[in-house]
Image (spheres, rainbow, N blue to C red):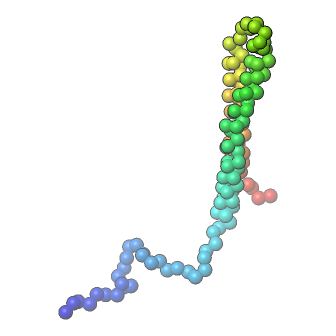
Amino acid sequence: MLPQLPDNREIPRIVHLFPERTSEPVAPPPEVVAMEQRLREARHFLKFMLPGVPIVVFVMSFVFGYVVVGVHTAPLDDGVNVPLDPAQPLLGAFLLALATGIFCSFIYWGFVRITTPQAPQ
């Protein structure tokens, strides 16, 4: 004959496999709800702003290329050989990098402003 096994409820367990569940869901604290809302807003902000970075850089490269290099050159059909100053493309690249950096820093500071908890007024 087989020995009788004790009831499972009587055996103490380190890890509770089936924790007691309450019938009512526990509402998260207001701080957690506010943080989740801020993160949702920050995610929306980034989804809207980050795709604009390559578009802005692409457009600015043509604008700076036209302003810095294209305005001072003669048309090709004139047959006039106009020397190109090597500082002009460097200036255009510097302006493009500066404008891109400023745009990215605005995105960063907008993200920080959204995710920082606001003091109650």
Note whether 6 is above or below 39 in the view shown: below
Q: Is residue 119 above or below residue 5?
A: above
Seen from the viewer's position, the closer of residues 35 and 103 is 103
Say which quarter of the image contains residue 23.
bottom right
Where in the figure is residue 39, as x and y percent of width and height? 66, 55
Residue at point 74%, 18% (across, down): 69
Q: Check the picture and name the quadrant holding the C terminus.
A: bottom right
Q: Residue furthest left?
A: 1
Is residue 115 in sight in this rendering?
A: no
Q: Is residue 12 visible?
A: yes
Q: Residue at x 70, y 14 (%)?
A: 87
- Residue plotted at (65% across, 67% down): 29
Q: Position of residue 22 (x, y in %)?
A: 56, 80
Extreme residue toward the front, this view: 77
The extreme bottom residue here reads 1
Of 1 and 59, which appears nearest the observer?
Answer: 59
Q: Can you tell which quarter of the image residue 118 is in? A: bottom right
Residue 45 against residue 27 in the figure, above or below: above
In which quadrant of the rendered image does the N terminus lie?
Answer: bottom left
What is the total number of numbered labels drawn onto the structure image? 0
Q: In front: 11, or 80?
A: 80
- Across and down, in percent, residue 52 comes to 70, 41
Q: Position of residue 31 (x, y in %)?
A: 66, 62
